[in-house]
Amino acid sequence: MTKLSEQYLTFDNSEGLIDENLYNMIIDCFDKKYKDICDFFNYGELLKTSIVPAPNYKGVAATYTETGKVIMGTKYYEQHKLDADSLIHEWIHVAQRYPQFEPGWLTEGLADYGREKFGVYNKEAGWALPKYNPKHHYTQAYRVTASFLIWLEDNVDKDINWKLNDLLKKGAYTDNCWVEFTGKTVDELWDDYAKANS
Ligand SMILES: [Zn+2]
């Protein structure tokens, strides 16, 4: 059987900029989870994507959603040789392909929500979602928002994250969608989350 990575992923590591073990972990993540990612975030359509090691990029990784190209900051990955699941986060951006990545806190929160859900090596990388803390707010994005989204799914509406992604894909997200889905504003839901976890 053809592996998904052979059909949909281009990852040129011929210069050896990415540690070989990490490279293999990333390919493994792709083969195991890319279909699930596209099922959840792109109605099942698989998109081609590529990874390009970037020695001059100072951050972790970034995705160009129009082309599906992901760059990996090689300096970061030299220090984090087990962080394969950071690519899961980026592949979610590939699959999201929203007309606008707004609001940013939600699009990044959903990417880390998906990393929690579809991650393979999060534990090895020392990556986990935080417990609620009074200094948190849902607009902080990334893991803080992802913890909130998981709580909403478990306690308020099991399909809420699928529905949020669906609205974002259609360019139809509004602040009022939270009320339509749950009867409460996002701020009221955040208060409920804070109370339940204090
Ligand atoms: Zn991101």
Image: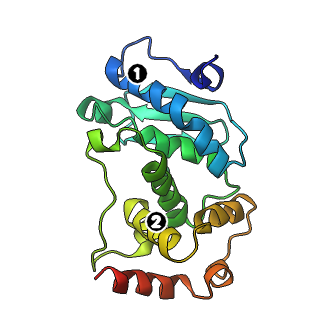
Q: Could one spot residue 154 in this view of the protein?
A: yes
Q: Nearer the viewer, residue 151 or 138?
A: 151
Tell me the kind of residue under disc 1. Asn
Left or right: 11 with respect to 78? Answer: right
N-terminal-most mark, 1 or 2: 1
Name the residue furthest top.
14
Q: Quadrant of residue 183?
A: bottom right
The coloring applied to the image is rainbow
Left or right: 18 with respect to 150? Answer: left
Alpha-carbon neighbours of circle 2 within 10 Å: few (<14), some, or many (≥20)? many
- Image coordinates of residue 133 in percent, x first then y, are 27, 75
Residue bearing mark 2: 150
Alpha-carbon neighbours of circle 1 within 10 Å: few (<14), some, or many (≥20)? few
Q: Could one spot residue 19 in this view of the protein?
A: no
Under circle 2, the secondary element is: helix
Q: Is residue 134 above or below residue 63?
A: below
As drawn, the label of residue 24 is: 1
Residue pictured at 61% horizontal, 79% vertical:
178
Tell me the kind of residue under disc 2. Ile
Please give the count of numbered marks on the rendered protein: 2
Residue pictured at 63% horizontal, 66% vertical:
164
Q: Quadrant of residue 21?
A: top left
As drawn, the label of residue 74 is: none
- Which part of the image, by quadrant, shows the N terminus? top right
Residue pictured at 60% horizontal, 69% vertical:
160
Mark 1 or 2, closer to the camera:
2
CA distance separating discs 1 and 2: 29 Å
Q: Is residue 45 above or below residue 133?
A: above
Under circle 1, the secondary element is: helix
Q: Is residue 72 above or below residue 180?
A: above
Left or right: 16 with respect to 7? Answer: left
Residue pictured at 62% horizontal, 66% vertical:
159
